[in-house]
Image (cartoon, helix red, strand yellow):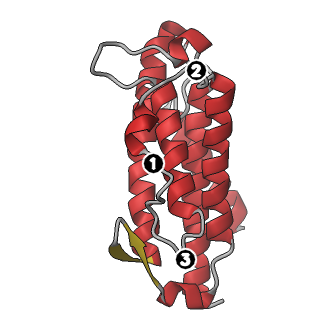
Amino acid sequence: MDEFRRLYRDDMLERFQATKGLADRALAQVADTDFFRQIDEESTSLAQMVKHVGGNLRSRFTDWLTTDGEKPDRHRDQEFVIGKADTREALSAAWEHGWACLFGSIEALEDEDFMRSIPIRSEPHSIPKALSRSLGHVSQHVGQIIYLARHLRGAEWQTLSIPKGQSQAFLEKMQSRWEKDAR
């Protein structure tokens, strides 16, 4: 594979994995009751976001090089409706399936695939454009997931990044690590 394409593919895979990791760590901190809780009538629950992202990724990355990213069996509006069958376990399985479709699709990319044009809702996209679009979309929702999970968890929230007041110590640790690796 061309070096630039390989680097791009690997970076996108890493960015998506890191994004999913943040969401998973946030979701793991939330009790089932809060997972399904809407903070008001117009808000979206964590369960709805998990259902939506899982459905979106499954649709976009199933046979993504040969079919439109908006599959006929996807019903986007229903992703924001929680029914009796939508248990946390079932929604988590759909979430994992969607991410597996994405990761498998990225890992399988070959040089010639980067020359393709693929449709999403009939609009042509290059592979980099489709991946960037998806990363932007899921990152937006992962940010919402983190924000809502943190709100619901309150004082018991465990930070997913650098704790408040510890930025300088973290920076020094990272600089020391890079200097050590450079030797």
Q: Pick the residue in front: 1 or 172.
A: 1
Label 3: state its secondary structure.
loop
Residue 80 vs 131, above or below: the answer is: above
Dot 1: within a 10 Å radius of its alpha carbon, few (fewer than 14), some, or many (20 or more) residues?
A: many
Please tell me which residue is depicted at 67% across the width and 54% down the height of the picture.
Answer: 100
User: What residue is pinned by disc 2?
Assistant: 158
Q: Which comes sooner in the sequence, label 2 or label 1?
A: 1
Examine the rendered structure and indicate whether residue 7 appears above or below residue 130: below
**Dot 3 and dot 1 residues touching (CB under 8 Å):** no
Q: Which residue is mark 3?
A: 65
Q: Is residue 31 visible?
A: no
Does residue 12 appear left or right of residue 101 in this picture?
left
Residue type at tag 3? Leu
Mark toward the start of the polypeptide (3 vs 1): 3
Answer above or below: position of 97 versus 82. below
In what quadrant of the picture does the N terminus appear?
Answer: bottom right
Q: Nearer the viewer, mark 3 or mark 1?
A: 3
Q: Secondary structure at mark 2?
A: loop
Can you identify the residue that label 1 sits on? 138
Q: Are marks 2 and 3 in contact (CB under 8 Å)?
A: no
- Tell me which amino acid carries mark 1: Val
| Image-based side of 40 in relation to 47, left or right | left
| CA distance separating discs 2 and 3 | 39 Å
Q: Which element type, helix, strand or loop, lies under badge 1? A: helix
